[in-house]
Image (cartoon, coloured by chain):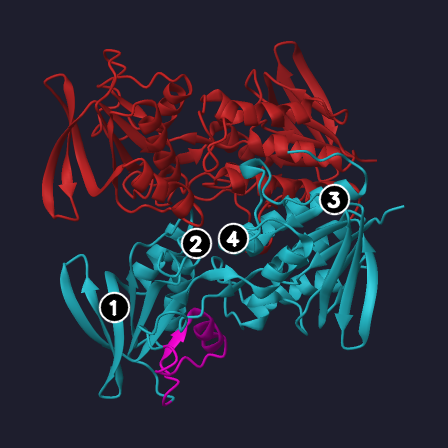
Chain colours: A red, B cyan
């Protein structure tokens, strides 16, 4: 009666880490990924270097994927979606759909590692001209350009002389309903600013921010090198609109330190788009009946002392499926969920 | 040959969680705590409510302690110190000292959960008058007063009319060598500001900050309620000195939003002291030979994809032993370390 298999939904960093550890603990693990490749956002969106360690993202993820796919206890199915779930803890029956048809599997526990998507900077506000001006890009676009060592103006292929990052696009914004801070964008923008300066040494790089949330070690690991070694210009300011003028972008707003209007020409503007729950996170939450918060992220209702249990026994959530998370958060929570899920599958009573 | 026992050093939240999960996974766990009670800082320093969930800290920790002490696989030894370690992964020999004498135990793996200590606000700088004025207290002092529902002026027992929090005391400070951000003080100060307003509804509460790092959900869970529901006054400003005048404290500095000097009377000033590695963290790191960073925290040299492995095989570090960490970080990393340590004890090869 019941299944001792663990189902992990999503093969990004958190899902892979959970699968790897659960397999190391002796459990049989099935990882289901709807995309055709594993690796999640770092692979899908061509991240250049990891934040905060500046390690090559492709190489790091390849190692993690390799550890999972080479483990005899793990089966990884890509291009596969979960289309139905029945049953409860210890005996979930899960329908999987792929190009080769439907399949049904049993699982005793489920880890949701379905992650986030980037805020669409064209949604509800056109102020930044993302869909109007090719040289207005997002953090994700910039990652891919930096990874390819091809950080040029999309409009004309020229090397930029002036690059601006604009923080808090789609975060800390009540008008669009995202009051939360996306946590990682300050660090990722600063990391990218360093990479731009490394790849395009003659470019001037500006970061327009409300405040820089360089928590913990990000302060000394990323922020100070950006300021001192790479001469990134941090400007406390609010950008109200982006225009096109004489073949360049014109960033308009207010320098709030000086308390004066600003109007500065730029060649590339990078919008530091925040996190939102992915479509997969929303769909899986609904299908499994796990409680979500008003933003659509999966709730972990037991508080600080249990970061991974959801409202449904036997279903755990990790990484950015539960809210804004950095890579360290995702990896740590994945490990915690692996431990709890495996203990549960072995009949241990795991309480908060 | 070798031992399948896990030794956890430190019985704070991270150590207890690691012990609980490792035991749930079937391992034999010995937890060693040098203090005479388990529970770590939340118990030792009488935390009132947890940040971010506002759950009663004593109650929450009692549950966690109960889960550990009632588990047949766990032995908890308080008032016991680790005084020597020999051997290596799979076969550490550990000398324990307590009031009843010395004892030697074998362990296959070790989890360091030795935590942090608060920055001493009298160290290297007298500007805040912590040792001079009884009404200048720290976040830790304030927790104990709030827990006792006795938030009064230490100098005379009067209910305060005006209370100020001063952020970044001992953090983000190059002069004292702590460039890092302590990560949690913004959230804890805001939580305490709410508690002060709940317990002393007539008090006005001010938070003097450089910037408020209310990352992730802390923005909507703590910051906005503090601003809107509890009318906490956030003042962007730098405090340069605290004086005593007419039986009150006088806070002097600059309101940086207005760009003007400020001089405001207060009844209680709470210094938001940052984190530093505890003495136990420093001692255990040295005894075990694990690499530390320049602040004395234990390094996790494998980067974002392994948040708990140290430079010494078989030795893991969790929570604030590795750097500034909130409670969620501590609990998640504890779970990850439990999974890795148990897998290691069972002979699994756990690589990054």
> Is residue A302 in view from this perspective?
no
Residues under numbered marks 4 and 3 in contact, where contact means CB atoms less than 8 Å apart: no
Judged by depth in the image, the label closer to the viewer, 3 or 2, is 2
Judged by depth in the image, the label closer to the viewer, 2 or 1, is 1
- Labels 4 and 3 share a subunit: no
Q: Which residue is mark 3?
A: A344
Image position of A156 (left or right of A352): left
Q: Of the residues under marks 2 and 1, which one precedes in the sequence? A: 2
Q: Specify start and end residues of the magenta stretch as a single range.
A: B130-156
**Helix, strand or loop for disc 3:** helix
Image position of A112 (left or right of A264): right
- Which subunit holds the residue at mark 2? B
Spatial CA distance of label 4 from label 2 is 10 Å
Judged by depth in the image, the label closer to the viewer, 4 or 2, is 4
Q: Which residue is mark 2?
A: B183
Image position of B136 (left or right of B140): left
Q: Which mark is residue B323?
A: 4
Spatial CA distance of label 3 from label 1 is 54 Å
- Which subunit holds the residue at mark 3? A
């Amino acid at each position: 009666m019941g299944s001792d298999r663990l189902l992990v939904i999503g093969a990004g960093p958190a899902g892979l880490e959970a699968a790897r550890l659960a397999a190391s603990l002796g459990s049989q693990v099935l990882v289901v990924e709807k995309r055709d490749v594993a690796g999640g956002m770092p692979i899908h969106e061509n991240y250049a270097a990891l934040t905060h360690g500046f390690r090559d993202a492709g190489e790091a993820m390849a190692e993690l994927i390799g550890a999972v796919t080479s483990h005899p206890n793990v089966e990884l199915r890509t291009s596969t979606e979960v289309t139905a779930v029945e049953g409860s803890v210890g005996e979930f029956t899960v329908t999987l759909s792929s190009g080769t048809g439907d399949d049904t599997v049993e699982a005793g526990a489920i880890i949701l590692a379905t992650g986030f998507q980037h805020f669409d900077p064209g949604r509800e506000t056109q102020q930044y001209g993302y869909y109007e001006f090719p040289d207005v890009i997002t953090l994700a676009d910039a990652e891919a350009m930096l990874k390819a060592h091809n950080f040029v103006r999309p409009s004309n292929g020229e090397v930029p002389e002036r690059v601006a990052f604009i923080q808090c696009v789609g975060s800390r914004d009540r008008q669009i309903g995202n009051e939360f801070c996306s946590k990682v964008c300050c660090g990722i923008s600063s990391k990218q600013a360093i990479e731009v300066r490394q790849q395009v040494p003659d470019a001037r790089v500006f970061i327009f921010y409300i405040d820089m949330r360089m928590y913990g070690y990000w302060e000394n690991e990323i922020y100070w090198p950006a300021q001192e070694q790479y001469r990134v210009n941090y400007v406390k300011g609010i950008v109200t609109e982006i225009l096109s003028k004489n073949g360049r972008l014109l960033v308009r707003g207010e320098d709030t330190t000086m308390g004066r209007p600003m109007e500065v020409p730029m060649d590339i503007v990078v919008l530091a788009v925040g996190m939102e729950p992915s479509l997969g996170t929303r769909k899986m939450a609904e299908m499994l009946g796990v409680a979500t918060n008003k933003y659509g992220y999966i709730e972990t209702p037991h508080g600080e002392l249990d970061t991974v249990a959801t409202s449904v026994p036997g279903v755990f959530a990790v990484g950015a499926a539960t809210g804004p998370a950095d890579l360290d958060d995702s990896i740590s929570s994945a490990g915690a969920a692996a431990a709890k899920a495996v203990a549960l599958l072995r009949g241990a009573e795991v309480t908060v």
